[in-house]
Every structure is written in C-alpha cells, then in structure tokens.
C-alpha cells in the first residue's frame, strides 16, 4: 500500500482560531466508496467556525472544512460515478477539506463542469447549494414576493440575492456596514438596512407598507430571531438557518400564535441533499445559473492553506464579504 504525506489543518481541541494547526498527514489508499482528491481550492464557511468553537460537536482530533474542488487522484472499490483525473467539487461532511489532499466519501462529490474554475467551484458549493434549497424548497419564492434576507453581503447572502432577483423577488437585505450595503446593491438588493444602526423591523414595515414579508431568512440567530418574527406577515415563515451571533434560545411556541400563526423551520443543507438525486438536481440548477452568468460567485479573498486561522478570524470579525477560499 502506498502512502503520501500532505499538509492539512487539524484541531485537537475546540477554541479560538489558534486551535487550527498546520500539520503533516499521511494518506493511505481510499477504501470502499471513497476517493482521494487533490485540492486546487478550498471553501471557507461560517459553519467551519461553529465546528471550531464546539457549537457543532465532532470527535477530536478532527479535520476542518467541508468544501473543496480539485482532481480525483485515486478511486476506491465500488465507486462508479467518478474516475481518476476527473475535475470535481463537493460540500458536506465529514470535515477535512482544509488539506492539500484528502480521502473522502465519493457520494457527496460531483463532477465540476469545465466552464467552472476550481476556485469558483470551491467557493460556491456549500453557499450555493444552501441558497438553492432555501429559495426553492424551504420556501418556494414566487415572482413578486418581498423577502427579508439577513447578512445579504456575505457568502450565502450575495448568491441568494442574485438568485432572488432572478426569481423575480424584491429583496430587503440587512448588512453590517455602509460598504456592505454598496456590495449588496451591486448584487441587486432593492432595500438595504444597516441593522447595527437602524431598527430593521420598522424599516421592513415601512418598505412593505405595514404588511410585513411572507418569509425571513435569518442566519444571525440569537441577536435577530425575535425581531425577525415581527417582520413577518400573518402565517409567514421564519427560516432560521444559522447562528452567527449565537444559537437561538428555546422558543415558547405560543408566541407564534400571538404574532399571527407564524411558522418556524430550522433547515440544514444535509437534509435537503439527502440522496444523490437531490444533490444532483440542486447542483445542476446552481451550475447552470453560474455558467450562464446569472449568478456571479464573488471571491473576495484568498488565503494560503496555512493561514486558515486568519481566514476564519476575519470571517468571525465580520470583515469578509462574498466568498473566501484557501489555496493549498
Ligand atoms: P457569511 O459570509 O455570511 O458571514 C457571516 C456574516 O454574518 C458576517 O459577515 C456578518 O455580516 C453576519 N453577522 C451578524 N452578526 C454577526 C456576529 N455577531 N458575528 C459574526 N458575524 C455576524 O457566512 P456564510 O455565507 O458562510 O454563512 C452564512 C450563514 O449561513 C451562517 O450563519 C451559516 O452558518 C449559515 N449556513 C447555514 C446552512 C444551513 O444549511 N443551515 C448552510 C450554510 C450556511 P454583517 O456584518 O453584514 O452583519
């Protein structure tokens, strides 16, 4: 059995960015259902920070990162949809994409169309597939809907903003700074709200003539959850899909009745791409929109793999916009 040594980020305990260690890792042969991928680019996601901090627990020591693009170098027994030399991209568990190469389950890996670069592939899979299911499945956005989407200048946000415009929606987006408001506008956002300064509930009411919106996409969590409910029209849907400010505290469900028969869902990408068919459908939609230019993937920063902790620190400090990647 041949082995190869590669550089990778590992964590041996949860904590701040400093727990991410740049180490040597030995890779053996892929087992049944596995492939060995050599990465050309690696996606950085806010989700990685939850794993680093321990909000989403995983066994230690652990790899880091759930998104990458590269070339298949080895194929294990039983893998039929991929071959050595294929250009591929993926998003999903288990963690371990912050590495020059890795052995991983083949069932979450897709062929990357020639028209999409490795960098774009690595930047868009997790955030793009998330935007895809949120807008087309969790709540099916209709032409003419007015939608509130928080952190609209971020990775998921900039993709979702362009997608919402393509679906014919009016987009109200929250942002942390005037610079981010300009970025949101450049991606088609109709109304930007500086939610660190302005009362976003009042602004949403003003923009919608007092009616509120049928759906709120909230990845901020603790700081915005209750106020987001107040932005909904009767029977509206609250999509709480992240915890950038901390997890949402337990909810007294009677509140939903008092505020107008509201609905709440807490979706995850994993349950929307549960099988190969769903994954391929979602990815085909995303790929086609990116290839046609309808959705542009904004890579705003590239960090060397060994600077992964800096990339995560910048993201946690709200300094990044669009998507950021690691270069192995
Ligand atoms: P982003 O690029 O959007 O970065 C997170 C943004 O959250 C920041 O830029 C910041 O934007 C905003 N934010 C608001 N409050 C805080 C805070 N207290 N600390 C830090 N950031 C804050 O990240 P991603 O695009 O990778 O992910 C966006 C969200 O979507 C994350 O919460 C992530 O967990 C969630 N997600 C959920 C998935 C699911 O299936 N459930 C899948 C993928 C992502 P600003 O300064 O404008 O407020």
Image (tube, rainbow, N blue to C red):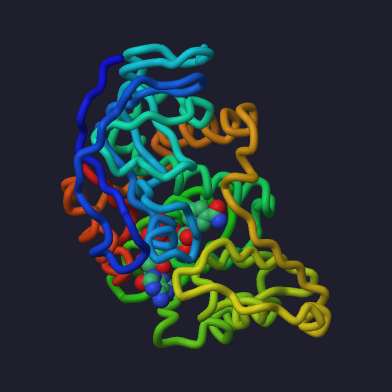
> Going 35% across and 16% down the picture, which residue do you hit?
74
Which of these two is toward me, 62 or 210? Answer: 62
> Going 83% across and 80% down the picture, which residue do you hit?
257
The answer to whether residue 209 shows anywhere in this view is no
Quarter of the rendering containing residue 37? top left
Q: Quadrant of the C terminus?
A: top left
Which of these two is toward me, 290 or 264? Answer: 264
Residue 67 on image: x %, y %: 39, 41
Task: Note whether 162 is above or below 282 in the view shown.
Answer: below
> Going 42% across and 43% down the picture, which residue do you hit?
295
Which of these two is toward me, 289 or 116? Answer: 116
Residue 151 on image: x %, y %: 44, 67
Task: Note whether 48 is above or below 182 in the view shown.
Answer: above
Residue 190 on image: x %, y %: 48, 65
Tell me: 303 left or right of 317.
Answer: left
Tell me: 22 left or right of 72.
Answer: left
Task: Note whether 238 is above or below 224 in the view shown.
Answer: above
Q: Quadrant of the N terminus?
A: top left
Tell me: 130 left or right of 251.
Answer: left
């Amino acid at each position: 059995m041949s082995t190869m040594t590669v550089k990778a980020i590992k964590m041996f305990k949860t904590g701040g960015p400093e727990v991410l260690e740049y180490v040597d890792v030995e890779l053996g042969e892929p087992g049944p259902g596995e492939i060995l991928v050599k990465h050309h680019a690696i996606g950085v996601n806010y989700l990685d920070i939850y794993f680093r901090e321990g909000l989403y627990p995983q066994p230690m020591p652990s790899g880091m990162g759930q998104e990458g693009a590269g070339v298949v170098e080895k194929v294990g027994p039983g893998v039929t949809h991929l071959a050595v030399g294929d250009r591929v991209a993926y998003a999903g568990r288990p963690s371990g994409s912050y590495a020059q190469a890795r052995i991983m389950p083949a069932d979450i890996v897709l062929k990357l169309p020639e028209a999409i670069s490795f960098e774009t592939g690595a930047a868009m899979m997790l955030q793009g597939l998330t935007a895809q299911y949120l807008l087309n499945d969790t709540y099916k956005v209709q032409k003419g809907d007015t939608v509130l989407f928080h952190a609209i200048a971020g990775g998921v946000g900039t993709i979702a903003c362009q997608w919402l415009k393509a679906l014919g929606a009016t987009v109200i987006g929250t942002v942390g700074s005037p610079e981010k408001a300009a970025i949101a506008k450049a991606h088609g956002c109709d109304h930007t709200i500086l939610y660190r300064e302005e009362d976003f509930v009042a602004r949403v009411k003003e923009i919608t003539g007092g009616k509120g919106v049928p759906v709120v996409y909230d990845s901020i969590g603790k700081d915005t959850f209750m106020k987001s409910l107040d932005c909904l029209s009767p029977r509206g849907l609250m999509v709480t899909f992240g915890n950038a400010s901390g997890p949402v505290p337990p909810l007294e469900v009677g509140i939903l009745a008092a505020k107008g028969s509201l609905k709440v869902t807490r979706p995850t990408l994993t349950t929307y791409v549960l099988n190969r068919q769903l994954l391929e459908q979602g990815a085909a939609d995303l790929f086609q929109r990116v290839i046609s230019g309808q959705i542009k993937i904004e890579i705003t920063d590239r960090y060397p793999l060994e600077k992964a902790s800096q990339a995560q620190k910048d993201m946690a400090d709200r300094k990044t916009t669009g998507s950021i990647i690691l270069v192995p």
